[in-house]
Amino acid sequence: MDGLLLVDKPPGPTSHDVVARLRRALGRPKTGHFGTLDPMATGLLIVAVGQATRLNQYYAGREKSYRAVARLGTATDTYDAEGAPRPGPAAGPIPDRDAVDRALLPLRGEIEQVPPPYSAKKIAGTPLYRLARAGQPVSPRPARVIIHDLRVLRFEPPDLELDIRCSTGTYIRSLAHDLGQSLGCGAHLTSLRRTAVGEFRVEQASALSLWDGDAPDVAGLPFWVPLEQLLPEWPRFDLDEADARAVRDGRSLPPDRAMATPAPSEAGPVGPDGEALIRLFDAGGRLAALARRDPGTSRLAPFLVFPAA
């Protein structure tokens, strides 16, 4: 069982709790998540099983979408409803819709964002939330993120509901906090739901309660994505039995057999040195390896090999 499980996380459990529940139900120790959700947050959590855990770098960095509700009028120390209110200039009267729209303008596009002091970001190897809980001063470094889309869905003061599409690493809590600072009234996040990660949508996901007992038969269900269906934007190349054995042994395919694979200039991802990135499949239709086709030598070199069934 190698692939991705799409789970609709409820409020309360951590992402680790969700993974632990699925690990017990599946009896598969090799299970992990691609992108954390805070305990308060709900929505799409991608859980990798078996060999799919090796693809984390290709999925954790994908664009994400959220529905969020920010409550204007009060800031908190955690930037969400679980924190303590900040008095003084962090609280104030609720602005009108025109003021909100103006304050949202500089929060779109490529921005510098400071992570919340209570977050998993690390300073010298220590998560910020541990330092903050210990009463130590916390000065997170700003990070560059991209807010691709930021739209108001509902404004019923003091609550502002937003639809957000952003790059990985974006803190929606910080977005709510920064909006409140700009408006001069303070703000904090009261709810957050992740609706999409890359090509996956929360509508495909299973309820976490489905995994309370034994694992269901997931074959053909929308919340199960087999290993062979992952990275669909990478071109596919089918190998014969001899070449599949060679690739699984870590050997490159020579130019005479590699020339039939897609060139770097064709549709599909390209590596840092201009090499084409390709999925290689064995004669049985199983993913054998991820490979690079060097544009200079045309050799096809596997860099991530998957075992045969």
Image (tube, rainbow, N blue to C red):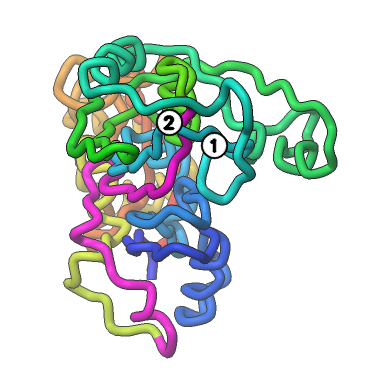
Kind of residue at badge 2: Ala
Q: Earlier in the sequence, mark 1 or mark 2?
A: 1
Residue 266: which quarter of the image? top left
From the top left corner, tell me how far across and down residue 20 is, in percent.
56, 70
Question: Where the C terminus falls, by quadrant?
Answer: bottom left
From the top left corner, tell me how far across and down residue 108 is, in percent.
30, 16
Q: What range is drawn magenta here?
A: 186-214
Q: Magenta stretch: residue 197 in it?
A: yes
Give the residue at x 43% y 34%.
172
Kind of residue at badge 1: Tyr
* Residue ID for mark 2: 176
Secondary structure of the residue carrying numbered label 2: helix
Circle 1 Cα neighbour tier, 10 Å, few/some/many (<14 / 14–19 / ≥20)? many
From the top left corner, tell me how far across and down residue 175 is, in percent.
43, 27
Give the residue at x 34% y 19%.
275
On screen, residue 262 above or below 19: above
Q: Magenta stretch: residue 93 in it?
A: no
Question: Where the N terminus falls, by quadrant?
Answer: bottom left
Circle 2 Cα neighbour tier, 10 Å, few/some/many (<14 / 14–19 / ≥20)? many
Give the residue at x 47% y 73%.
22
Q: Seen from this angle, which residue lies furthest bottom?
A: 213
* Residue ID for mark 1: 79
Residue 298: which quarter of the image? top left
- Determine contact: label 1, label 2, CB under 8 Å: yes
Give the residue at x 63% y 44%.
84
Q: Between residues 139 and 160, which one lies in front from this camera angle? A: 160
From the top left corner, tell me how far across and down residue 88 is, in percent.
62, 25
Residue 122: which quarter of the image? top right
On screen, residue 125 above or below 272: below
Real-space CA distance between mark 1 and mark 2, rounded to the nearest whole angstrom: 7 Å
